[in-house]
Amino acid sequence: MEQIFFTSDHHFGHANIIRYSERPFADVEEMNESLITNWNAVVGENDIVYHLGDIFMTPLPAAKAIRRQLNGRIRLIRGNHDKVAESMPDAFEWIKDLYEVKIPDPDAVEGRRRIVLCHYAMRVWNKAHHGAWHLYGHSHGSLPDDPNSLSFDVGVDCHFYMPISFERVKRIMADKRFVPIDHHGADQETQLESE
């Protein structure tokens, strides 16, 4: 049975990201090889990978060669460095700016877990006040995690340079203290009624 994975910000081919994000690689060739090996160590051929942006920062021929080596069916959430990826749409099941996925989960309301996927971190998102999760990238681990928010960075810099499974995401979310923010609060309703 297929598994579901989430990841972001590989920056394949981007030599400067080694310095910017203090990645433990000697050069871009070692980084690319390690990221491919780590990916394929967890992702199977038919697994689904939601990649939350900034996958390639290399010329098109090199990007195509790297994509051919990666297992799984990739669904790309567009990042701010995905011009090369956009020029190779056949490499992905689809490319979108934002996506809400509903994954079967017996522990979720009505048996489906709603997850809002975006390259960028949000403070609120659709159904957040009902326990929907939010996964993002872009920040390379530089944003402090909020233990009261059902969101976190799934970028490779935060997760041992590999995609993380839905099951691992569930374990991380289980450790958070969910404090719902209801933007339809009683104070707002009272104010609207008095206007």
Image (spheres, rainbow, N blue to C red):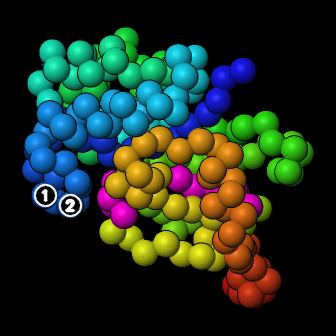
Residue type marked 1: Arg
Identify which residue is drawn at 35% across, 55% down.
157
Residues tagged 1 and 2 counted as in contact (Cβ below 8 A): yes
Q: Where does residue 186 sit, x and y in percent of width and height? A: 79, 83
Residue occupying image coordinates x 64% and y 38% = 101
Residue 175 visible? The answer is yes
Q: Classify 10 Å Cα crowding around label 1: few (below 14), some (14-19), many (20 and above).
A: few
Dot 2: few (<14), some (14–19), or many (≥20) neighbours within 10 Å? few
Q: Secondary structure at mark 1?
A: helix
The residue singled out by tag 2 in the image is 22
Q: Residue 146's image quarter?
A: bottom right
Magenta-tinted stretch: 131-141
Q: Which residue is mark 1?
A: 19
Residue 188: percent from the left, percent from the top?
71, 82
Q: How many tags in the picture? A: 2
At a point 56% along the width and 26% down the height, the residue shown is 48
65 horizontally vs 8: left or right: left
Q: CA distance from mark 1 to mark 2?
A: 5 Å
Q: Is residue 140 magenta?
A: yes
Quadrant showing the N terminus: top right
